[in-house]
Amino acid sequence: MTPVPVAPVNSPRRVLFASLIGTTIEFFDFYIYATAAVLVFPALFFPAADPASAKLQSLATFALAFFARPVGSALFGHFGDRIGRKATLVAALLTMGISTVVIGLLPTYAQIGVAAPLLLALCRLGQGLGLGGEWGGAVLLATENAPPGKRAWYGMFPQLGAPLGFFLATGVFLLLTALMEESTFFAWGWRVPFIGSAVLVLLGLWVRLSIHETPAFQRILDQHERVSLPMMTVLRSHPRALLAGMFAALATFVLFYLMTVFALSWGTSQLGYSRDQFLWLQMLGVLCFAATIPLAAVYADRRGRRTAMMVASAAIFVFGLVFAPLFVAGSLGGTLLFLALGLGIMGLTYGPVGTILAEMFPTAVRYTGASLAFNLAGIFGASLAPYIATWLAQRYGLEYVGYYLSAAAALTLLALWMMPRRIQE
């Protein structure tokens, strides 16, 4: 009698570490760009005649990655649903890593003129492509290996990569500015985190090459249920899930990029904080972000992902109404409270969002569907958020930035309310 081959089983620790390390690296790469877009790139990659215009142009290149992310979702999602989660995750990590290292090697505007911002924009697009394929695959790697009743808990591990990546990126910039003179930092010091990220990428590749395919996708392979064009299947057969998922993640993106990129820009330009002061405050706030992600995951496994997301979105709505008075409190303690509250609420919504998006699509198109919903939310919720917030604050006042956040939360609450109570497997 011929023995039936048994599919290899992934170790839970290896799965969770592989999903966490990959997203940590990806978000580290993403955030060092976000920090540099506020602190470094306006002076080095754009004409210096008008500092305000240079900052807006730098923030515009920051936004480019969010428009590339849905393209990355479609590209990597296609191969993730056709070839497998493992190989696609490796390719996404390489795309992001190479783009980031090249940014650290680029000549500046003073050296090559207008070609400098164009090359910077091209590399930023590469970062967006890579992250567009990374996030969905990491969430599926975790959730498709999860035991019953633990899906949100497993699904929060790749989400922890966001605060960890931010913490590492901010810490590196703080260390460099502490060790270097301002002139040295602008001459070459800012390049260190971009080039040094190659070490993290190699670590991530080593971990991911050691895992096996997820059981859910292996069943698709065994039962010959792969679809030929996952993207077309999502658009044709699951448009409601795609639209609902996009708006369900909208407030998550708006909140995070207001609390990080916009807050850093406004705090250092309008509220009188030094760069180091505000980065330290943000790092403390990110600790609250990391702490509330697992709390939200436990609550989501007990009460449901939809309920957990609705509670978090209601909190975002209220926070938007007190955004301005908290942010302009005029003291370090008040600003720290503002960042701790905002980023703590961010963890409440970010913890379950990956799991709820993955559950909205069948396995055969889950990589494409979940990634596309998440990254379309990135276009509308994050890509222009720092730009829009800066424009609103300058033209109408900081309170209108809070209204903008509350409006995004209202749209997310509506999408979650209309979502089926029983999300499909």
Image (cartoon, rainbow, N blue to C red):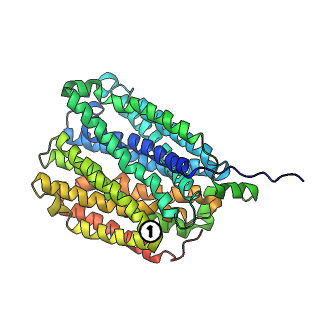
Residue under label 1, please give it.
300
Picture coordinates of residue 102 (x, y %)? 43, 30
Question: Image height check: is 250 above or below 32?
Answer: below
Disc 1 marks a residue whose amino acid type is Ala
Residue furthest out toward the top: 111
Q: How crowded is mark 1: few (under 14 residues within 10 Å), some or many (20 or more)?
A: many
Quadrant hosting residue 89: top right
Q: Regarding mark 1 in the picture, which secondary structure is present there?
A: helix
Please state if 307 lies on the left or on the right of 320 as rendered: right
Q: Position of residue 13 (x, y in %)?
A: 53, 49
Q: In which quarter of the image is the C terminus?
A: bottom right
> Residue 402: x and y, percent?
23, 63
Q: Residue at x 29, y 41 (%)?
A: 170
Nearest to the observer: residue 370 or residue 9:
9
Q: Tell me the residue at 30%/60% (across/down).
A: 344
Q: Residue at x 54, y 76 (%)?
A: 422
In the image, 221: left or right of 246? right
> Which of the 4 image quarters holds residue 176?
top left
Residue 114 seen by the camera: no
Q: Residue at x 48, y 63 (%)?
A: 152
Q: Can residue 331 be seen in this view?
A: yes
Left or right: residue 77 compared with residue 161: right
**Front residue of 210 and 126:** 210
Q: In which quarter of the image is residue 323?
A: bottom left
Residue 177 image offset from top left, x and y in percent = 22, 32
- Left/right of residue 378 with respect to residue 43 in the rendered view: right
Q: 55 or 318: nearer the eye?
A: 318
| Count of numbered circles on the image | 1
| Up/down of 241 relative to 294, above or below | below
Farthest-out residue, left: 330
